[in-house]
Image (cartoon, rainbow, N blue to C red):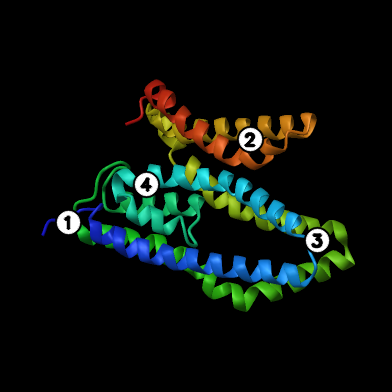
Amino acid sequence: MKFNVNHPVLYVIVGVIIACVLAQSVYFLVRAMKRAKQLGIKSETIKKTISSSAVFTIAPAIAVLVGVVALSKSLGVALPWLRLSVIGSITYETVAAGNALEAAELSAGTTITDPSIFVTIAWVMTIGIAAGLVFVPFVTKKIQTGLSKIGMKDKKWGEIFNNAMFLGMISAFLGYVFCDVGSVFKGDTSGLIPVCVMLTSAIVMAVCGGLATKFKIRFLTDYALPLSLVLGMASAIPYTALLGGK
């Protein structure tokens, strides 16, 4: 049987897994509603909390949808749908899949027909993100305790350590963005495309943040991420045409 990244069997497997996750969500929602009533919280407050939470989950869902669409050409819909619906991260999954495709000497957007390559990419996307599940129970408490102690002794240094950890995480992705900039010196300007896309996304994010702060537009705060992602990806089209990327 010929391998197909969109084979119905993959959809069945992914559907069962996501159904289990949704069942857990419904279970804890029901438990939370019962507990809220036991605490004497009014029904109107409970309904308002549920509805407002549901509305504001749309923003991150749009970002996830963008990631699924971006990866679907090469990996089909089932695998990205699974990876980005459970514990996946759009910033990690796209980079991991891109690196795995590059290692297999395939360009982004090339539909995979070799099952061994598909399985390899699935493992790369899964193992890396699963490391967090293993380490979190063992090291998170120690890290938080250490940071709390530093913050209690010196609040300024506590903030510096927190910011340093965040910037360390961001720097890993910046390396991926700037890795091909050196090709400019060889006459190939395509290495600037990721940089321009990143700057466009950053500008959109800054504009959304500025407008949300100045005019008190709450929804911009929640939708700044998907907007920056969508507009950043859209900007890659003219940048690619302009800078000669393949």
Tell me the number on the disc at residue 205: 2
User: Gap between marks 3 and 2, in whole Å?
Assistant: 26 Å
Please tell me which residue lies in front, 181 or 185.
181
Q: Classify mark 3: helix, strand or loop.
A: helix
Could you classify mark 2 by the number of other residues whose Cα lies within 10 Å: few (under 14), some (14-19), or many (20 or more)? Answer: many
Q: Residue furthest left?
A: 1
| In this view, 193 is above or below 85 | above
- N-term mark: 3 or 2: 3
Disc 3 marks a residue whose amino acid type is Gly
Horizontally, residue 103 falls left or right of residue 133, namely left
Tell me the number on the disc at residue 71: 4
Tell me the number on the disc at residue 175: none
> In the rendered image, which quarter is residue 120 located in?
bottom left
Q: Residue under circle 3?
A: 158
- N-term mark: 1 or 3: 1
User: Gap between marks 1 and 3, in whole Å?
Assistant: 52 Å
